[in-house]
Amino acid sequence: METAHPPKKKPRLLVRLGTFLVSHSVAVSVLCCLAGLLTLLLLPVLAKNTYVSENALMPGSANPTFSERDVREADGLVEKIMSLKSMGGETGIELPRLIAQHMADVGAEVYHHEFHPQIDQFHPLHFFSCTSNGRMVLYNNSCVSAGINSVGIARASRGDGKESIILVTPYNAEKLEVSDALSLGLGYSMFAHLSRVSWLAKDIVWLAADSQYGEYGSIAAWLKDYHNPTYTDYPEKHDNEMCRQTNSYDSCDKKNVFNIFRRAGTMAAALVLRVVDNLEDSNIDTLTIYSEASNGQMPNLDLINIVHFLAIHRQGLQVKIEKVGSLLNSVWLKFIGELVEWTGKVAVRLNPQWRFGIPAAEYVDGTATLASSLYYQALGVPTGSHGAFRDYQVDAITLEFSPRTSSYKDIEQSAFLLRGGRLIEGVIRSINNLLEKFHQSFFLYLLSAPNKFVSVGVYMISFALLIAPLPISAAALFSSPNISEAKPGDTTI
């Protein structure tokens, strides 16, 4: 009597799908790569307009009070700095003293922060190594002089000292330029103005960073001492004995300038201010925003949104972000842009509600901007000294101002400083309104324009399609019948 065999159980749908993908791994991999590239090219089309998520920010709700009086204070400091340069003295010592004295004149708490140059942690050979523990760096077996940061703290009239906003103006005392003087003048006038206002609820810290050894290093050294206080001066004594260096600045402190490191509470946000020459022919002052920090970290999108809103709609500045210049003249990219534009027009004719096409020029510009954002986030290297703040979970960006002309005429310079000061005041006023840290908007995004972004939920589709062939190909290689087990007598070389 024959025994009845039980019917063969049919594999589950997930198992059958996996078997199908593995058996057709080559075709599936090619298809996924093509789909990933297609969705990657469509990201500029899928970009959304930025918007302010946090209602408490209220950008532009109050009229700025930064006036021509503050501009005259900035012009006065610029003239003193340039005269100091023309005298040919030791600007590395005299300039921090001059800045500290101006800070003290507005009633701020002032101190000097001494630091030594560190090994560049973003160098390929030192990327994964820890930084030296406050020790001097030796160049050609000789010690270098210490850098000196000048720090002023303006206590808020309505605050409790638990929160602060940081203003940073890097300068190079050894290679002092007009742009450095304008940066310091803008930072000082803003600091002096904020020390007099009555609406301030967060302390203002102005860091005049000595960038003779690099902007990032000077700010990172100050942040390290700010968040990690040291209770012994052993490393400094060891370095002084090793290098036989005496600091000639110790005896140069003026009245009301302290050597004690002072703090101002949790940092709500930080703005790095820089003034550079405008290399392009432009009839309007330009503001360039740098936001990428180390390891691909980005500040909260609301911080960029309020800067863009106030710069465009209040001060009339032209706002830019960095692009990949070689893509702007790409023929194939222009062709794709024209194809996208034509497809959008055809879609609108078929259904007026299908509005996804953009002009070809906007597509090329958005792709170049998106490529720059992708590159710096993937590379993990910050685009400015603001990246040092993000290492401590502080939202920070660099605001690079470019006046419409590089001649720095008196009238145009005053108008430029007035617009820049009012913009910074508006941004600080919005941050001052926050009751908590930035959290409402995005932290994971790509920028395709100053006012357009691609959220993480959109660009992860392209990323998933591009990496999907990797596990499929690995599974196909593992289950391939062509790979036989090695016999016991075989030897592998």
Image (cartoon, helix red, strand yellow):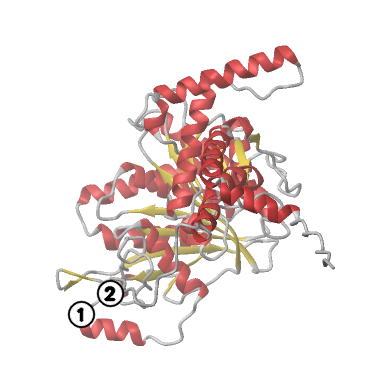
Amino acid beneath label 1:
Cys
Number of residues whose C-alpha sits closer than 10 Å to that of mark 1, classed few (under 14), some (14–19) or many (20 or more)? some
Residue in the image at 28% along x and 86% along y: 238
The answer to whether 250 is drawn above or below residue 177 in the figure is below
| Crowding near the residue tagged with mark 2, few <14, some 14–19, many ≥20 C-alpha atoms within 10 Å | many
Label 2 belongs to which residue? 136
Nearest the camera: 109 or 117? 117
Residue that appears at 46% across and 74% down? 225
Q: Is residue 120 left or right of residue 11?
A: left
Q: Residue at x 70, y 42 (%)?
A: 52
Rendering coords of residue 346 (x, y %):
66, 14
In depth, the one of 436 and 406 nearer the eye is 436
Mark 1–mark 2 CB contact (< 8 Å):
yes
As shown in the figure, which amino acid type bears the numbered disc 2? Met
Residue 412 falls in image quadrant = top left
Residue 337 rendering spot, x and y as whole percentages: 52, 22
Classify the position of the C terminus by image quarter: bottom left
Tag 2's secondary structure? loop
Quick one: SS at disc 1? Answer: helix
Question: If you read the primary sequence from the N terminus, does the residue marked by circle 1 or circle 2 appear first?
Answer: 2
Q: Who is closer to the viewer here, 302 or 284?
A: 302
**Numbered tag placed on residue 243 in the rendering:** 1
Q: Which quarter of the rendering shows the N terminus? A: bottom right
